[in-house]
Image (tube, helix red, strand yellow):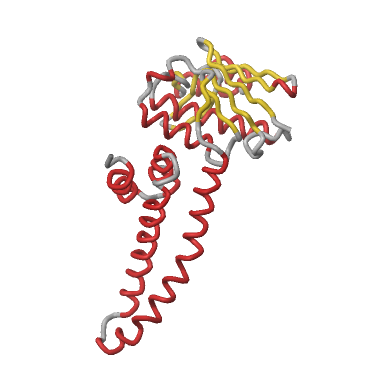
Amino acid sequence: MNMDLQVRVDNEKIIVDIPQKGEQREFKNVLGLANGRVVSIGQSLADLIRENPQNEKKFREEVKFEPLYTASAEGLERLHLFLSFQKHQLSAARIPLFNSRSINLILDLPKYESIDENARNQFEFSLTKFVVKKLTINNDLKGWKNWQRWTLEISRSMSLLVWPFLWYWFILSIAFLMESLGIGRWLVYLAGLFVIYYLLLFIRTFILRFFLPHDLLRGELLSPSMGMGKYGKFLVKRLIDKE
């Protein structure tokens, strides 16, 4: 059974609807920060004081409130945080949000199209990467097809599976040479571990670029969770954006 999750930013409010459950939740479009840490999402100062009146003085002195969603790259990052918060809240309530491939996420975001394209691509990639079945933003279908996401995930798993076998073959192939030359074998073995890993990543990206959307691969390589750093940017520049 498919389930629609509708999130709409309306002036100073964020409205969350789950039609199949007959539920609607309303949040304020604000993020509470104290010393650089997020202390509240979708709550005003009055909300915090009402929930914890004993901390009223501390709230007034330390918590600063900023817009949660704005038409900017930072606004998308904060909205992603809000959606993660909703995932936690609704999962705790035994509502299958974000842990089901049957979720259709429908977002209504003011001025979304004016946001930097790379920021939008990364936002859409993060949401549709094995999170939801379908993503719609401002009545426009976003993201990628399921088979494309599956191909990306399977290719990643296969690379990680082949990696140690290739490294073991590398060790067996040069072990005798290391002994004859007196070279520090463990240093070479460790270097080989990283070289083979990045070589596999390069080959995987080179092959996938011919039949997967480039923005999907770009999001994969630039995703902080992948930890590719400068090498990910190098692959994006050399293999994906060179056209």
Task: Out of 160 and 229, give the one closest to the viewer.
Answer: 160
Q: Quadrant of residue 196?
A: bottom left
The picture places residue 203, in percent across and down from the top left corner, at 38, 57
How many badges with numbers are in the image? 0
* Residue lying farthest to the front in this orientation: 210
* Residue lying farthest to the top in this orientation: 11
Vertical placement of residue 6 versus 170, above or below: above
The picture places residue 129, in percent across and down from the top left corner, at 53, 40
Q: Residue at x 58, y 38 (%)?
A: 131
The picture places residue 228, in percent across and down from the top left corner, at 37, 50
Q: Residue at x 55, y 29 (%)?
A: 135
* Quadrant placement of the N terminus: top right
Q: Is residue 158 left or right of residue 219?
A: right
Task: Out of 38 and 170, give the one closest to the viewer.
Answer: 170
* Quadrant placement of the C terminus: top left
Q: Is residue 242 left or right of residue 61?
A: left
Q: Residue at x 30, y 40 (%)?
A: 241
* Residue lying farthest to the bottom in this orientation: 180
The picture places residue 232, in percent across and down from the top left corner, at 34, 48
Vertical placement of residue 78 versus 173, above or below: above
Task: Out of 14 and 104, give the one closest to the viewer.
Answer: 104
Q: Is residue 161 left or right of residue 184?
A: right
Vertical placement of residue 35 versus 67, above or below: below
